[in-house]
């Protein structure tokens, strides 16, 4: 379990029933806040983390290190902390303080490890809302996120329609298609097939090679074809020293660098569960159709995507926007061409900032 310097920890003693079965006897939630909650508690904004993110979205006095959405949160920024009370909580099933595989099961006194149950995006947002209630917020002014965070923001608007006024979702989907799921499946297999992976009772050994390979694979789809072709050379680094087992191209060096980060970011069982949570995502589950699910919502929406996204193609964001419009909901659309592809929400701050400001000012 990775401890975040600036995070607060709240323990909710109530059991949590999970949507694919199983129950957690209690939940601990690691979170951070910025800004001040107004006297009428009407200015709260919930930021939803993506797959490898956590509660440290922005720097603070408690932790001055830059957060993963540092350029978006703060005084005068898109999520203006002079105006809004901004909340971000680490993910259920993750390894950054909120209950996950490396947490201790109070029933056994041992880590959950591979015995940690399957979680879904719905379970993740249910935990978010427990925290929101604990903080005394009855209605969120806005929820926002990209990729997995975008799935969370849309799911929050469906599951808690009276609690969400605005929802911003970028690089997300209403339901995961087989194309995207196959990519994540290969990443999970890389971990499971690593000889160091223990699927035993607690599984404390980390499959470093498998985690690295899974992250390298993911990186190819997080970024765009254009970026790889523009950024890297098609020629070997050293024409005179080509070896099959060595790094011969600069893109290989880049991928190896990204892979080395993985064991520092992920616990293996966290990777497996959050990856599966995204594959299981379907906002229409339990409804007759996506239209029926979205008809429940009372929020205004801003849906955005990039035509360079290789992981969750832009037609899946367009589907969300067009469905909302077809059933009479208010939805803005934003298309952002970006070298960064799926990762555009982590890079294209000049594009997002004015649009989000306008959306929050409506």
Image: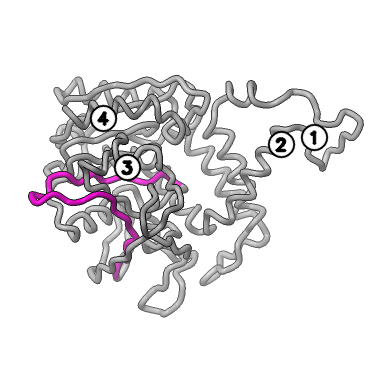
Quadrant in which residue 288 is drawn:
top left
Neighbor class of circle 4 (other Cα within 10 Å; few <14, some 14-19, many 20+) is: some
Q: Is residue 124 above or below residue 5?
A: above
Secondary structure under badge 1?
loop
Q: Are marks 4 and 1 in contact (CB under 8 Å)?
A: no
Between the residue at mark 1 and the residue at mark 3, the CA separation in whole angstroms equals 43 Å
Between the residue at mark 3 and the residue at mark 4, the CA separation in whole angstroms equals 12 Å
- At x 36% / y 56%, what residue is drawn? 61
Residue on which disc 1 sits: 248
Give the image location of residue 158, x and y in percent: 20, 40
> Which of marks 4 and 3 precedes in the sequence?
3
Picture disc at residue 74: 3
> Which of marks 4 and 2 precedes in the sequence?
2
Of badges 2 and 3, the one in the foreground is 3
Q: Is residue 143 shown in magenta?
A: no
Q: Is residue 28 shown in magenta?
A: yes
Of badges 1 and 3, the one in the foreground is 3
Q: Are marks 2 and 4 in contact (CB under 8 Å)?
A: no
Q: From the viewer's perspective, is 198 left or right of 66?
A: right
Of badges 4 and 1, the one in the foreground is 4
Q: Are marks 2 and 1 in contact (CB under 8 Å)?
A: yes
Question: From which residue to which does the magenta span run?
Answer: 26-51
Secondary structure under badge 4?
helix
Quadrant in which residue 241 is drawn:
top right
Q: From the viewer's perspective, is 108 left or right of 358?
A: right
Picture disc at residue 357: 4
Between the residue at mark 2 and the residue at mark 1, the CA separation in whole angstroms equals 7 Å
Looking at this rendering, what residue extends furthest in the right direction? 240
- At x 42% / y 73%, what residue is drawn? 104
Between the residue at mark 2 and the residue at mark 3, the CA separation in whole angstroms equals 36 Å
Residue on which disc 2 sits: 252
């Amino acid at each position: 379990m990775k401890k975040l310097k600036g995070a607060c920890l709240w323990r909710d003693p109530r059991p949590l029933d999970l949507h694919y079965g199983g129950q957690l006897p209690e939940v601990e939630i690691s979170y951070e806040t910025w800004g001040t909650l107004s006297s009428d508690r009407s200015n709260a904004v919930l930021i939803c983390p993506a797959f490898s993110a956590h509660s440290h979205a922005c720097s603070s006095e408690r932790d001055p290190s830059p957060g993963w959405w540092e350029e978006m949160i703060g005084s005068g920024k898109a999520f203006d902390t002079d105006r809004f009370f901004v909340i971000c909580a680490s993910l259920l099933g993750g390894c950054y303080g909120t209950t996950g595989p490396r947490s201790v099961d109070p029933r056994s006194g041992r880590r959950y490890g591979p015995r940690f149950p399957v979680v879904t995006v719905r379970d993740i947002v249910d935990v978010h809302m427990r925290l929101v209630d604990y903080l005394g917020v009855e209605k969120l002014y806005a929820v926002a996120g990209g990729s997995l965070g975008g799935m969370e923001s849309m799911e929050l608007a469906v599951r808690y329609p009276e609690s969400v006024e605005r929802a911003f979702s970028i690089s997300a989907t209403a339901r995961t298609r087989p194309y995207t799921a196959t990519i994540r499946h290969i990443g999970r297999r890389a971990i499971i097939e690593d000889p160091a992976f223990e699927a035993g009772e607690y599984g404390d050994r980390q499959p470093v090679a498998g985690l690295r390979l899974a992250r390298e694979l993911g990186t190819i789809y997080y970024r765009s074809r254009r970026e790889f072709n523009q950024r890297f050379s098609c020629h070997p680094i050293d024409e005179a020293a080509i070896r099959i087992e060595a790094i011969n191209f600069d893109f290989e060096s880049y991928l190896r660098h990204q892979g080395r980060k993985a064991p520092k970011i992920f616990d293996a069982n966290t990777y497996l569960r959050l990856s599966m949570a995204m594959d299981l995502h379907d906002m229409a589950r339990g409804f007759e159709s996506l239209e029926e699910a979205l008809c429940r919502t009372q929020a205004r929406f801003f849906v955005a995507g990039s035509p360079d996204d290789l992981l969750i193609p832009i037609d899946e964001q367009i589907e969300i926007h067009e469905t909302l419009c077809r059933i009479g909901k208010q939805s803005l659309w934003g298309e952002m061409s970006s070298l960064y592809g799926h990762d555009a929400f982590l890079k294209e701050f000049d594009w997002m900032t004015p649009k989000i400001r306008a959306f929050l000012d409506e």
